[in-house]
Amino acid sequence: MTAIRTTATRQRSYRSREVLLRVLAFVVLAVAAVAIVAPFLWVFRGAISPTDAELYRLPPGLPTNPTFGNFGKVFQQVPFAQFALNSIIVATSITLLQLVTSSTAGYAFARLNFRGKGLAFTIVIGGLMVPLQVTIVPLFLIMTNLGLTNTLWALILPPMFSAFGIFLMRQHFLSLPKELEEAARIDGAGHLRMFFQVMLPLSGPALATLAILTFTYWWNDLFVPLVMISSVNQETLPVGLVLLAGRYSTGSLGTIAAGITMAIIPVLIVFVIAQRWIVQSIASSGLKI
Amino acid sequence: MSLPSARGIGGGVLRGVTPGSERTATKKRRGDGLAAAGFLAPSGVGFLLFVLIPTIGVVLLSFFDWNLLSPPTFAGGDNYLQLFKDHHLLAVFGSTTYMAVAILAINIVVGLLLAVLLEVRMPRWIRAFFRLSFLFPFVVSSSAVALIWRFLLDKDFGLVNYWLGFLGIPHINWLGSTAWAPVAIIIVNSWKTIGFSILVYIAGLQGIPNEIREAAIVDGANAWTRFWRITFPLLSPTVFFLLVINTINAFQVFAEPRVLTQGGPGDSSRTIVEYIYDTAFQGFDIGYASTVGLTLVALLVVLTLIQFRLSRRWTFYE
Amino acid sequence: MKHSTKRIAAIAIAAALAVAGLSACSTSGSSGGSKTIDVAYWNYGPGAVTNNTNLQKSFEKAHPGEKVVLTPIAGGGWGEYVANLATLIASGKHPDIAFMASEGVKFLDQNNLLFPINSLLKTDPEAKKIQADMAPGLLKSFSAGKDIASLPFGFNDFVIYYNTDIFKAAGIPAPTGDWTWPQFEAVAKQLTTSTRYGYAWTGTEIAPGVLPWIANQGGNLVSSDVCKPTANSAPVVATYTFLNDLIKQGISPAPPASNDLISQFENGKIAMFGAGRYVLPSMLGAGFTSFDITRYPTGSTYQTTLGAGGYPILKSSKNTDLAWEFQKYAASAAVQDAEIGTKTAPYDSVPSLRSTMVKTVAAGIPPANSKLYYDAVDNYKTLAPFPAPAKYTQFESAVISDSQLIFGGNDTVQQGLDQLQKDLEPIVTCN
């Protein structure tokens, strides 16, 4: 009897502690979420404020006469649609390119046996430690010699090799069961068929993870276009936003906020729709070393 | 989800050999050379053109004096001597390291805390809302992030100081004082990057089998003990992954100081990458910029090697 | 192993060639035929596109058979523009003409890119006519040593903008421009309230930032040959002490490294600030007109600080005759008169021709005291040289970073300026 009662009280106190813990967790999460989201609300509010006076009003509230006029002004100030198009082209191309280069190399490192593999892989990981920012001048010269500076190619090609991507895909291919390969081999599958018909169909989550990470990274990059591109019509959104906020361009914070909003919203929508799937794909691709 | 040969990289990098498990997997066929060449070709071309040749180029350039516009002249080791004379360099390395360590710590510790808290039982849509909120900043370009925060952190008209005012904190000169400017960069960059760390942690936590944790609950272990005895060891490969990736990223911060503080006051919020850019494209001193770049590579190599070396002591692979 | 050694050697050689290739490629041709010139300009916004496209069209119309190719160059700030221009040239493109402001003249000159127009000015009758209609200080600010870079088509001189409503409400008479530093300080103090600063200056640029004040102490940030920094000279110390005092008294904010001053001015958060005429399109475009301009207060002396803009001819141009025609054309009365603009969308600089400015004032474009934009250059001494060493951007960012040390209260004035002097020594040289 006593033994049973003790367990019961222990469980009760355990349960009340658990409730307390849950409330505490909830509070911490809510505070963090508000702190992280608040700046966006501020920007969205600025984007629909008719005058800058709204932005100086404290405490901040909803704008009294919301307007969409600021969005139109963005297009008068800078070729925003062109920036967006360039960004889409660049980020999509890099993503596709990296999917190809990383999956093939990742497959070779995970599933093929060849001389110098260990050395080659060490070199790949070494590539992780040479940031693009360090090699930007020679990259610029190479692009110049290829006649590609000031074109979108100069933004698309340099990231085509991705140490991170290869590493990610290698981890993924290593995790696939050996039996699969052996069965296919008995069927007489060559390397190409093995790769395209056996391995790739099982690689959806890993490829998706790589695609998402690559796309967001290059969608947001400010550095490479800053160096490679000198003409406005070839610039991407991140540079475009800085141009929009430049000294001569505008004095209106509302216009800048509208520009930022337009750069954010499309990516956000994609994330809202895809978020559960993103977590799943990252979970199943096992981001570990 | 843990991988049988996940240990491979750590071992492979340090010893320069492939782990045994893989070798056995393909032992029977040793003639994959041609196929391997084919599969490696796309990455190989990219590596050659955009990593190897540029890296050699940087090394070569570090021995030259060149301003982009006139022909380069050979400078011998002058650029390397300059490293020791340049009083900015030490300051820039100092502030970069300070900011990187703080960003790293926030990502690893606070990220883990938030991810673990997300595990607490709650309605699904609320969890989805939290998760999404944390991820928001990650998808926004650094330049947009920096532009937003430039207004929020304004000393007089910014919202941050306004809200802090309610706590009785006097207006902080976020962007104009040596003490606060790096803090501002740390906050803004962490705000942007923490979503990714949380995401990876969530994924890692999902990989821990429920039975193990439930077994511990039945054993009567409290939450704290459960976390350190069960969850953390199983999560350690994820922590290590984030440590390596975030270290490399934290040393490459560029857009935030550029848009928020221009590296100032003094060098207090200047990062190495920004210094490289300024030296190369504002001072037009390509040779010296290359030399500084090489010091960053050296630093990253050393840090990564140390991390791999130490990781053997605390990471746990199933 | 031998194979890989060979391969590495081959790659190294290839890389060396790539590096060497840059000097070879710089000889590759410009825009070709003798009837075409390539004009690079800074695309800082829609105003720049409109102005340059109009210029291109009207030049082609006035010179049948000749063609102008425009190369718009991006840049969120002046430094990025110059960096982009340099990378463009390094990538083997050679515009015949590149838009340049006073800040970049030394850059062109020291890199041997500038085609000086001294001899052309002496012989060309059209150029003489243009010069006669131009304030003399303009050409002086657009020269490197004796080399004159270009006929300017416009300029910005720095004046104090003040909010007329705030002055009225505070019962302070509108300033006449004949004021001293203590008088200015007293006025600014009166205008300061708990939600408003009396005066603010930008922390992102040295002009209008600290430079007009230094000029009015008879000083400069560099020696007269622009070969040595003079950042801790007495006039600079006096200036920073005064400005720092404004911050300490709460009259001015420590200048942040951002440029929202226009917005703050429009919304009554600051009563006065310093700027050029370039702020007009944004203020008038937003319907804000309750402001006027006046001169910076007189310190131990008074000099107007200005920066001019023009289309210098580059040395590599194969068609200097046509390029010279273009430069003259851009500065001509016909073009400048056509660009005056309207009361809500005025031209974004001061026209370089006196006669055009007279017409601008007659057109009733605010502010009321618009005449001052030109008079401040025509009737007063101007600061020369403009403190712009070849590495102007690096120079400016060093000044900004170290000024923040002082204005943010991290360093004393003397410490900060000694530091600045030390930082500027390798940047401001003539070797």
Image (cartoon, helix red, strand yellow):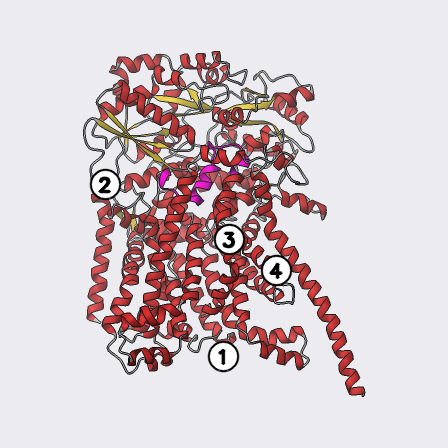
Write down the chain letter for disc 3. B
Q: Which residue position holds label 4?
A: B125
Q: Which residue position holds label 3?
A: B95
The mark lying in front, picked from 1 and 4, is 4
The residue that appears at 21% across and 56% down in the rendered structure is C14
Q: Quadrant of residue C36?
A: top left
Q: Please, which residue is most extreme toward the right here? A: A2
Q: Position of residue A129 (x, y in %)?
A: 39, 61
Is there one chain holding both mark 1 and mark 3?
Answer: yes
Disc 3 to disc 2, C-alpha distance:
38 Å
Amino acid beneath label 1: Glu
Disc 2 to disc 1, C-alpha distance:
59 Å
Q: Which residue position holds label 2?
A: C26
Q: Quadrant of residue C88?
A: top left
Q: Position of residue A205 (x, y in %)?
A: 44, 66
Write down the chain letter for disc 2. C
Span of residues in magenta: A233-256
Inspect the magenta stretch and tell me whether residue A249 lies in it: yes
Disc 1 to disc 3, C-alpha distance:
39 Å
The mark lying in front, picked from 4 and 3, is 4
Is there one chain holding both mark 3 and mark 2?
Answer: no
- CB contact under 8 Å: marks 1 and 3: no
> Does residue C329 appear to the left or right of C193 in the view shown?
left
